[in-house]
Amino acid sequence: MVLPAKQFNETVGTKSSLRLIRVRSLNQSYHHLKQLEKYKSVAATSGYEVGNTYEMFVISNTLFGGLEFIGLFLGIAFLTMLASCLMFKVLSGTKIDRDRYQMLIKIGVANKQLKRAIAYEIGVLFIIPGIAGIGYVALGLQMFKKLMVNPYDQWWWSVMGFTICYCLYYLVTVKLYQRLVLQKKMR
């Protein structure tokens, strides 16, 4: 209910004050807002209810922390499935490829060159899906800009972890493939 100015001035009551604080970044001002949270408990004991953004910030960080955990878990699961499928695809063709490489060995191609060619051939199969996956995730994070303060915050850790795991899968696949293809032909 809004009173006219004359009637409002005639009203008897106690004076109280309200202080609004605006910050540019909740992440950077987190510790200051946490200190101001102490004043809320003083106001609550005197009978006033004080709501603030700090509480919502803590709740949303908790919620999105859980979402990040689920995303990381699913990311590891999909990485494992992707790399395993690629490894299976590459290693399932070794019987056919063994004859090709044995022919190259017979015409005098050096073993070092064969290993380099294998690493390059498998590298192409691994690099294209890896880059596409990182690109899709980078574009997909755009959807979370309205929900999260900064969805790209610390994103490079995930990319670095993905790259390290993916490279390990690549190296294991190359070594297994080289061992299967370049072994001496059984008679």
Image (cartoon, rainbow, N blue to C red):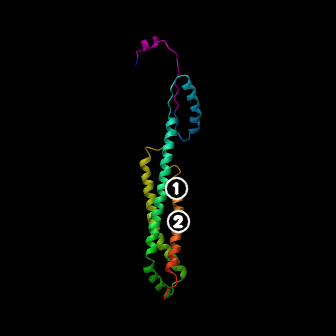
Q: Residues within 10 Å of mark 2 (few under 14, many from 20)?
A: some
Q: CA distance from mark 2 to mark 1?
A: 14 Å
Q: Residue at x 52, y 78 (%)?
A: 179
Residue 135 painted magenta? no
Q: Residue furthest front?
A: 187
In which quadrant is the N terminus drawn? Answer: top left
Residue 11 painted magenta? yes
Residue 178, compared with residue 163, is above or below; it is: below
| Residue that numbered label 2 is attached to | 167
Q: Residue at x 48, y 70 (%)?
A: 123
Magenta portion: prevailing SS class:
loop
Residue 54, compared with residue 66, is above or below; it is: above
Q: Position of residue 52 (x, y in %)?
A: 50, 32
Residue 4, compared with residue 130, is above or below; it is: above
The residue under label 2 is which amino acid type? Cys
Residue 78, compared with residue 88, is above or below; it is: above
Q: Which residues are magenta?
A: 3-21
39 and 2: which is toward the camera:
39
| Residue that numbered label 1 is attached to | 158
- Give SS at disc 1: helix
Q: Are marks 2 and 1 in contact (CB under 8 Å)?
A: no
Q: Position of residue 172 (x, y in %)?
A: 53, 70
Q: Earlier in the sequence, mark 2 or mark 1?
A: 1
- Give SS at disc 2: helix
Q: Position of residue 59 (x, y in %)?
A: 50, 39
Q: Residues within 10 Å of mark 1 (few under 14, many from 20)?
A: some
